[in-house]
Image: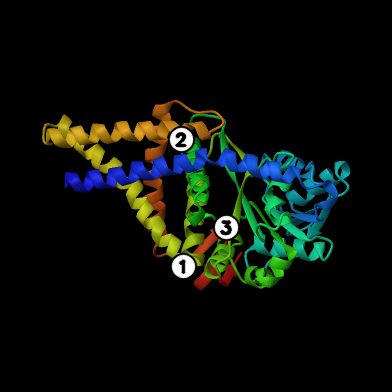
């Protein structure tokens, strides 16, 4: 049994170390892409439509939208899309248009056969029409650097890829367990993106050429699907299409006092999207959940057995050895955070994230639908929306 535990613990620490190495390689890739972008004169950058579905009343939304409307991209068409003209997000957009008159506001109406975000996005594409040669899709609650759009569209402009993606990082503004656990989960996904085998489009920051949008039938896919990025990932994986990761297109998500239900629901949606759209990756995610949770559980039981004098000395030694190795690896992971927390808090956040990961994954096994922004979607194969209820 101890040998099985050692194997699982070694695999876990090895994976975390591999991801840390992949993360450390990102700055070099970012610098190379930035240097290549500098060789493209302003007049060579094609007109790009920045399409942003906007909904809700997030406290960071105004600042996030301003950061996107202040991009240094030379020919940018910002299109902000809401479901209705009366919702709070629509009022915010009208206020922003006074300061940024180039921004267009599109009222999409309520979705009938797909996720509301997909519907809003497609209406934004329709509004762009043939004006734009590149489509950039972005969420409305993350802060962007002024060169975000250049970073994201660079590989497309240079002809290196038809699809590109960025990601985001969590800027934890407190040391509460849920906030740090959320930051860990986002960092895990970001570092997985750094491995080519796991690179796939992320709906919060992705771009594609208009030609690729048409060639691969993205509009037809999204028009009947519950989600944008995972459905596109399934399509591109099936057709062997490369997605270029742009490390410089890294959005910043500020988090403080992050609520447990918000974190849990976010994590559940991520797992469900994979289950419906990329089932092979969902199965791999189950193995990852087991790998993340089993060694800490065994270590806890071994240490408890030692305290109660019912366990073996070998088990206690193995637990301490594992915890030391885990602490060393997670210490390296902290360097990817804007403000590294104390190591013991970071390790505890890791344990909590692992436990939540297993709980959420188990809940998704029997699931047949998704609840998102107050809408209940019954979902079929590939993420196709079978029924929706408001």
Marks 1 and 3 sit apart, C-alpha to C-alpha, by: 13 Å
Which numbered tag is attached to residue 372?
A: 3
Q: Is residue 4 above or below residue 301?
A: below
Q: Secondary structure at mark 3?
A: strand
Q: Residue at the spot x=48%, y=49% of the render?
A: 192
Residue at (50, 31) in percent of width and height: 335
Q: Is residue 374 in view? A: no
Q: CA distance from mark 1 to mark 2?
A: 35 Å
Asked whether residue 203 appears in the rendered view, the answer is yes
In the rendered image, which residue does mark 1 sit on?
368
The one nearer the camera, 50 or 348, is 50
User: Quick one: 165 or 18, which is closer to the camera?
Assistant: 18
Does residue 56 appear to the left or right of 127 in the view shown?
left
Instruction: Measuring from the top left, give residue 129's x and y in whole percent.
Output: 82, 65
Q: Is 281 on the left or on the right of 90, as rendered?
A: left
Q: Which mark is residue 333?
A: 2
């Amino acid at each position: 049994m101890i040998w099985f535990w050692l194997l699982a613990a070694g695999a876990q620490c090895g994976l975390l170390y591999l991801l840390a190495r992949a993360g450390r390689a990102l700055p070099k890739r970012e610098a190379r892409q930035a240097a290549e972008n500098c060789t493209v004169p302003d007049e060579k950058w094609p007109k790009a439509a920045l399409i942003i579905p906007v909904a809700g009343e997030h406290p960071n939304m105004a600042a996030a939208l301003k950061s996107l409307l202040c991009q240094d991209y030379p020919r940018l068409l910002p299109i902000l899309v809401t479901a209705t003209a009366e919702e709070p997000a629509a009022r915010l957009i009208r206020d922003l248009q006074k300061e940024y008159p180039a921004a267009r506001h599109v009222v999409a109406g309520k979705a009938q056969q797909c996720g509301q975000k997909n519907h809003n996005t497609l209406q934004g594409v329709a509004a762009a029409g043939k004006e734009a040669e590149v489509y950039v899709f972005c969420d409305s609650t993350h802060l962007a650097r002024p060169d975000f759009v250049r970073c994201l569209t660079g590989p497309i402009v240079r002809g290196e890829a038809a699809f590109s993606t960025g990601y985001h990082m969590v800027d934890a503004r407190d040391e509460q367990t849920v906030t740090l656990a959320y930051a860990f989960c986002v960092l895990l996904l970001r570092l997985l993106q750094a491995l080519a085998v796991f690179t796939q489009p992320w709906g919060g920051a992705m771009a594609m050429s208009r030609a690729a949008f048409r060639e691969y039938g993205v509009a037809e896919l999204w028009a009947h699907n519950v989600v944008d990025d995972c459905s596109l990932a399934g399509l591109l994986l099936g057709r062997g299409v490369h997605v270029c990761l742009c490390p410089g297109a890294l959005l910043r998500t500020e988090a403080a006092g992050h609520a447990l239900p918000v974190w849990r629901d976010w994590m559940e949606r991520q797992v469900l999207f994979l289950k419906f759209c990329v089932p092979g990756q969902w199965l791999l995610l189950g193995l990852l959940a087991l790998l993340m949770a089993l060694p800490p559980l065994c270590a806890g039981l071994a240490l408890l057995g030692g305290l109660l004098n019912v366990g073996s000395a070998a088990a206690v030694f193995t637990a301490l050895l594992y915890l030391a190795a885990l602490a060393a690896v997670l210490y390296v992971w902290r360097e990817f955070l804007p403000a590294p927390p104390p190591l013991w808090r970071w390790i505890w956040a890791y344990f909590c994230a692992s436990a939540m990961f297993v709980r959420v994954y188990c809940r998704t096994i029997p699931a047949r639908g998704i609840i998102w922004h107050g809408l209940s979607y019954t979902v079929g194969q590939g993420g196709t929306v079978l029924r929706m209820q408001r």
